Amino acid sequence: MLDVKFLREELTRIKERMATRETEIDWDEFVYLDQQRRDTLARVEKLKERKNRLSGEIGKVKKSGGDAIALMREVEEVSETIRKGEEPLAEIEARFEKFMLTVPNLPEPSVPVGRSAAENREVRRWGDPPQFDFPAKNHWDIGEELGIFDFTRAAKIAGARFALYKDAGARLERALINFMLDLHTQKHGYREVLPPFLVNRDAMTGTGQLPKFEEDLFRVSEPDFFLIPTAEVPVTNIHREEMLERGQLPIRYVAYTPCFRREAGSYGQDVRGLIRQHQFNKVELVKFTEPEESYDELEKLVVDAETVLQQLRLPYRVVELCTGDLGFAAAKTYDLEVWLPGQSAYREISSCSNFEDFQARRAQIRYRKETKGKPIFVHTLNGSGLAVGRTLVAVLENYQQKDGSIVIPEVLRSYMGGLDRIG
RNA sequence: GGAGGGGUGGGUGAGCGGUUGAAACCACCGGUCUUGAAAACCGGCGUCCACUUCGUGGACCGCGAGUUCGAAUCUCGCCCCCUCCGCCA
């Protein structure tokens, strides 16, 4: 959520920048509701002042044994007027809040203007795509041949876009999770947390998935819960409605969780293999920082995620998202794209964003800079470190051998019981 | 699932129909004292919103309704926490 006062004061400038996101926003609605809300509020508050004053007088009169019947009748009338004014006020405030919750974050000034992913800006590349003296296979063929995936049975158990990993495949996924968690906790200074995988409506609203993107989520009714689409949701909400202590920042968490997404509207895409699943594993990095530090922390966050790929010796590139491709809550985002020989393409494996105070304002996460100072909203950031299923895909495709076997990256061998090859 | 207890400001915790936005203590900030520090003493210290020049007003004591001229205090519903019993990974 944006700051209402900021929005009011800088409306022209914000409108212009927001237009580069390629989304329609009804700014007339904002101006109307904002004005309407303030007018009505001022009127109702004046009446309440009168009512409070009269009630106080009644108290005094009664205490001194007087007759307050006339005063009481007067208050009755004022109360009636207040009731009549509060009805439209509540309606306007509800509409206003709804509006504010559906306005996306403002792109940070350095974010390049562009209409779609095609206009994202490549920042840097690392590693060279492997040269094979045989035709590179895609991961689902590799996996089926090695007997480590079983998509047919996964479909029987659950449906399309679910996976069943077996034997060395299951172990490799687990090895990747442990490797990532160990790296981030031991080398990068993150605290490991294991959060709930189901969350309530307030948590989803706090990070920005609700109210706008309910159709992307799996929902459990009775009681009302949502399956998390990313650990960002439960982990960012750890500090919802909290006043953080001075000197506590920055806070860095790493969490492994499964993630659940409806993937509505992606019917034609990535129908085969592990790339796009309803359920996948992810190791997520989440930070809470002071506003001045957040962009430095974003750069470090990207490097932390890159380190995973470098240690696995997987070629990748870093891309800066343009305004048109930016997520709803993000002010700035870098994507990491790993090279997939089976597709001869770079594919997203991590997304690292600074949300500035957008989520903190929704979730009421604040701290005091000075002991006497006003509370201020923290900045929140998060990034995949990494998407585990896609990392496994990248390992299979980049480490495939002519004979159909897979060499296990060195850093994973201790997590695989010393195994150095599958197949 | 059954029975009971409880949710108050940054923290502990009083208040249980009328200047109570809320005692007291801790923490924190300013001052006195001191060579300096500590201790002691004095003073200050919630958040959000609206209108505004200092300021004025409104709202907030888990959340939401209600009773009342007036609710942190009474009533109802919901959520959460704790204790005991039952069931259970």
Image: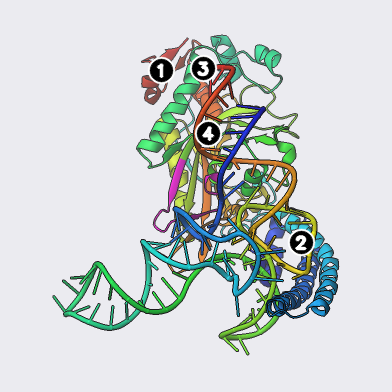
Looking at the rendered structure, whether the residues under marks 1 and 3 are on a common chain is answered as: yes
Q: CA distance from mark 1 to mark 2?
A: 57 Å
Instruction: State the quadrant of the N terminus of chain A.
Output: bottom right
In the image, which disc is placed on residue A416?
1
Q: Which mark is residue A133?
A: none
Q: Which residue is mark 4?
A: A338
Name the front one of labels 1 and 2: 2
Q: Residue at x 79, y 71 (%)?
A: A40
Nearer the observer, A215 or A340? A215
Check chain identity for marks 3 and 4: say if they share one.
yes
Q: Quadrant of residue A88?
A: bottom right
Using the image, tell me which numbered label, if any, was put on residue A93. 2
Q: Which mark is residue A170?
A: 3
Q: Is residue A28 left or right of residue B32?
A: right
Q: Work out whether disc 2 and disc 3 sit on a shared chain.
A: yes
Q: Chain of mark 1?
A: A
Give the percent coordinates (x, y) of residue A303.
Answer: 43, 44
Residue A211 magenta-highlighted: no
Residue type marked 4: Val
Percent x, y of residue A36: 80, 69
| Numbered disc in front, either 4 or 2 | 2
Label 1 crowding class (10 Å Cα cut-off): few <14, some 14-19, many 20+? some
**Residue at the location (47% across, 27% down)?**
A177
Query: Comparing marks 4 and 1, which lies closer to the viewer?
Result: 1
- Taking the image as shown, residue A283 lies to the left or right of residue A151, namely left
Give whichever of A155, A70 is nearer the camera: A70
Q: Residues within 10 Å of mark 2 (few under 14, many from 20)?
A: some
The residue closer to the viewer here, A226 or A116, is A226
Q: Are marks 4 and 1 on the same chain?
A: yes
Name the subunit of mark 2: A
Q: Which residues are magenta?
A: A237-253
Q: Is residue A232 above or below residue B68?
A: above
